Image (cartoon, grey):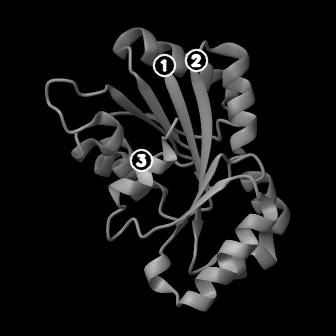
Amino acid sequence: MKMIITGGFLGAGKTSLVLQMARYLAGENPEHKAKVVILENEIGEVSIDDKVLENGGFEVETMFSGCVCCTMAGELVTNVYQIVNRLDPEWIIMEATGVAYPLNIKENLEQSVPMESCRIFCVADAKRWMRLRRMLEAFMRDQLDCADAVFINKIDAVDEAAAEQVAESVKSFNPEAKCFRVSAARGIDRAVWEEVFAK
């Protein structure tokens, strides 16, 4: 089983990106579809995102009332074991809350659950990035510094100069991460996913 933890601040577009990623991983061949489970972590008691994801045809599990990187860490491990035993997925894509620390989640899972791999992808909102960075720089650094890939989303909402400024800012937090400029609302090109998941 392989795991992907998707982080990013509230409203960055994680759900749209997760759904497209899941479609790519599941594959287009109906004879051999990879089994993909989406694990959603919500702070509140009601989730709209899981309805969107379920309508995409994927198995969706939702964890409410806390953040899995701190207050619900033990429950996360239990849920992942249950998903593995019940569904035996090839992939679990976890969409963390907008206030989660992805590295904490990864370390907790790697210590407790046998996995082939666990990667962290973060979604950055191109339109709000510079404003959010001024207010939340330390938090954003903690989200990004462990990412394997960063998706600068809503690139269609900014001009080229602003896009370049955001990309440079993201790279200043984590120069090692693969960085992709995307518009999840308009659709993410298959070539992006091929590069993301290249061996």
SS at badge 1 = loop
Q: Residue at x 51, y 25 (%)?
A: 2
Observer-nearest residue: 144 or 104? 144
Residue 84 placement (x, y as % from top left) = 45, 14
Q: Are circles 1 and 3 on residues that touch, CB within 8 Å?
A: no
Q: Are circles 1 and 2 on residues that touch, CB within 8 Å?
A: yes
Circle nearer the N terminus (3, 2): 2
Separation of marks 1 and 2 at Cα, in angstroms: 5 Å
Q: Which residue, given by chain and number where applicable, does mark 3 sit on?
A: 194
Tell whether 42 sits left or right of 29: right
Q: What amino acid type should be assigned to the residue bearing mark 3?
A: Glu
Q: Which residue, given by chain and number where applicable, does mark 2 sit on?
A: 115
Circle nearer the N terminus (1, 2): 1
SS at badge 2 = loop
Give the label on residue 1, or none: 1
Separation of marks 1 and 3 at Cα, in angstroms: 19 Å
